[in-house]
Amino acid sequence: MLSFKNYQVAIITEESQKYYFTNYSSEDGYLLLSKEQNFFVTDLRYFYAVEKVLVGTNFKAVIGKDYTFLAEYLKKVGVKSLGIDFTKTTLQEFKELKKLCPKIVDISLELQQKFLLKEPKEIQNIKKACEITQKVFLEILDFIKEGISEQELVAEIIYRFLKLGASDVSFYPIVAFGENSAVPHHKSGNTKLRYGMPVLIDMGCKVNSYCSDFTRTFYYGDPPKQFIKDYNAVLSAFEESFKSVKVGLKTRLIDKVARDILQQENLDFKHSLGHGVGLYIHEKPTLSPSSKEEFKNGQVFSIEPGAYKNGEYGIRIEDLVYLNQDKLVNFYTVTKRLIILDKNNKQFIY
C-alpha cells in the first residue's frame, strides 16, 4: 500500500485520496495506514456507511471526531515517525500532528508516484467521466442561442453533468464568448452571445472521484478566414502531438512539437501542452518545455494546444488520452474539426 521506508505509519486526510484507498469518498475523517492494520476514522454520521464499504478489506472502521484515536494508537504502538501529505495538510493540522509525533515525514511525492500510473478500475472511472462530458458537450450545442450569457451556459453544463450521473465537476466550467476566449482561464460572467462570436468551452466532471477534462472552440456565425486558418494550426498541433507520443520519450519533446507548429504561424501559445489527470485535475506528468518526465504506460494526460490573440479570440482544443500497451488511446470520439453554428443551431463541420 505504502513503502513505510522512513516513517512507521501514515494518515490520509484528503477526500479523493481516501477514495483511492477505500472506495469511499468522505470529507470527514482520516485514514490511518500501517504495515499491520489500516483504519478509517470517522464520526457517527458516516460510520455505518464506511463500515459497510470496508467489509472484506484490510481496513477497520473506527468512530472518532478528531485525532484522539490517532494519539492513542501512536502511544500504544510506540510510533516515532508519521507520514503525511504536506500538499494536503494545513499549518494548523501540522501543528496538531507535531504535538502527537516527534517526526513528521512528507509523503506527497510517494503518493504522486502512486497515483501516476492508473489501474484498470481507475481507467474505467475516467472513461465514464469522459463519456458524460462528451454527451453534455453535444447536448449543449442545441442549447446555444443568441443572447445567452456565459454564466447561463455554465449553469446548464453543471446541471447536465449531475443529471447524467456525475458526482461533481472536475473544476468550475470555463465558458468564454468572443474576445474573452483569448484569456486561457477566463472567469465566466455576464457576457452575452452575439452572432459572429467564437465560443470556447473548457469543462470536466467527476465519477467516483476521478476527473475528466475537455475543451472545444467553435463559432456561432460565419468565421473569418484568419480564424479558420488559426483553428487549423491548433488542430494540426494537436494531431502532430498525438502522433508523436511514445513510451520512454521526454514529455517536453511533445510540447515542442505543438509549440513549433504554432510559432511557425506566429501564434501565441500561453501554457504547457498538457498535464496528468486522475483523482485531481492537475497531476503528473506535465507536458511543458521544462519537464524532465517521460511517458509511461498507464499515464492519463491531456493534450491541449491553444492560440490566443488578445482582444480578438482564443482557440483551444483538448482531449484526454492514456497510454496503454505502448499505444495512445483517446477517451473522446467527438470531432476536433471546427464546428460552425448558424442562427437556427444547424451545425456545420468545417
Image (cartoon, rainbow, N blue to C red):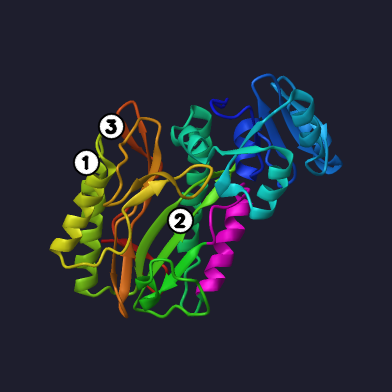
What is the x, y in percent for residue 335?
Answer: 33, 51
In the image, residue 86 above or below residue 198: above
Q: Say which residue label 3 marks.
A: 247
Which amino acid type is shown beneath numbered disc 3?
Answer: Val
The quarter in which the C terminus is drawn is bottom left
Instruction: Identify which residue is drawn at 52% across, 79% down.
Output: 190
Regarding mark 1 in the picture, which secondary structure is present there? helix
Judge whether residue 112 is colored magenta. Answer: no
**Disc 2 crowd, CA 10 A, few/some/many (<14, 14-19, 20+):** few
Please identify the quarter of the rendering in which residue 222 is found. bottom left
Q: For the magenta stretch, what is the residue range?
A: 150-172
**Disc 1 crowd, CA 10 A, few/some/many (<14, 14-19, 20+):** some
What is the x, y in percent for residue 330?
Answer: 36, 41
Q: Is residue 195 left or right of residue 206?
A: left
Judge whether residue 154 is colored magenta. Answer: yes
Q: Say which residue label 1 marks.
A: 244
Q: Observer-nearest residue: 172 or 75?
A: 75
In the image, residue 162 above or below residue 207: below
Instruction: Identify which residue is drawn at 48% across, 34% down.
Output: 123
Q: CA distance from mark 2 to mark 3?
A: 32 Å
Q: CA distance from mark 1 to mark 3?
A: 10 Å
Instruction: Identify which residue is drawn at 73% across, 29% down.
Output: 39
Q: Observer-nearest residue: 140 or 188?
A: 188
